Amino acid sequence: MEQKFPLPPFTAETAKQKVQLAEDAWNSKDPNRVSLAYTIDTEWRNRSQFINGREEVVKFLTEKWQRELDYKLKKELWAFTDNKIAVRFEYEWHNAEGQWFRAYGNENWEFDENGLMKKRYASINDVEIKAEDRRV
């Protein structure tokens, strides 16, 4: 059986660890690595897009990082309970034309008993920035 430590129920320490592990995985920009933190039948809402299952996660992330160049993410624990974590985040990237963006958002995560994320709901807003205004 797959397990992804730390496992719920979360403490302040293990919730922070889970957030850091997620940040590290996403910053790898490796869709397969990222997908292993999710259940086979994971459910996502990412902006207005609905994604179901690991295969769709890999496809979504592959396409995302083909568009969002030099992607860099920072996540922060916002709140947690037994098997749920809320985070705030910001990430920066540029498009093929060289325009930089900063995305701000919040995510709500729900985990199964094996520490795999079964639900991820993300609300995200993008803002154009100048290269010299980058901070992530």
Image (spheres, rainbow, N blue to C red):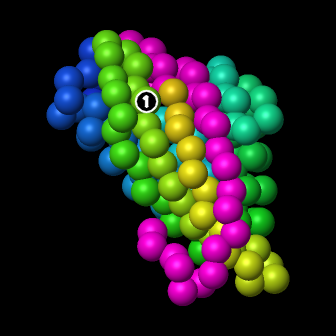
Residue 4 colored magenta? no
Going 26% across and 21% down the picture, which residue do you hit? 10
Left or right of 48 on screen, residue 83? left
First to last magenta residue range: 109-136
Res. 48 image quadrant: top right
Q: Residue at x 34, y 28 (%)?
A: 79
Compared to 66, does 40 lie above or below? above
Q: Secondary structure at mark 1?
A: strand
Q: Is 131 a magenta residue?
A: yes
Q: Is residue 23 left or right of residue 61?
A: left
Query: Residue 99, image x and y in percent?
Result: 74, 79
Residue in view at x 34 percent, y 38 percent: 77
Give percent across and percent down for residue 12. Answer: 20, 29
Q: Which residue lies at the image location 56% right of the left edge and 44% below the top edge?
A: 105
Query: x and y percent of residue 102 in the render?
Result: 60, 64
What is the quadrant of the C terminus in the image? Answer: bottom left
Taking depth in this image into account, of 133 and 26 the one nearest to the observer is 133
Question: What is the quadrant of the N terminus in the image?
Answer: top left
Residue under pointer 1: 86
Q: Amino acid at mark 1?
A: Ala
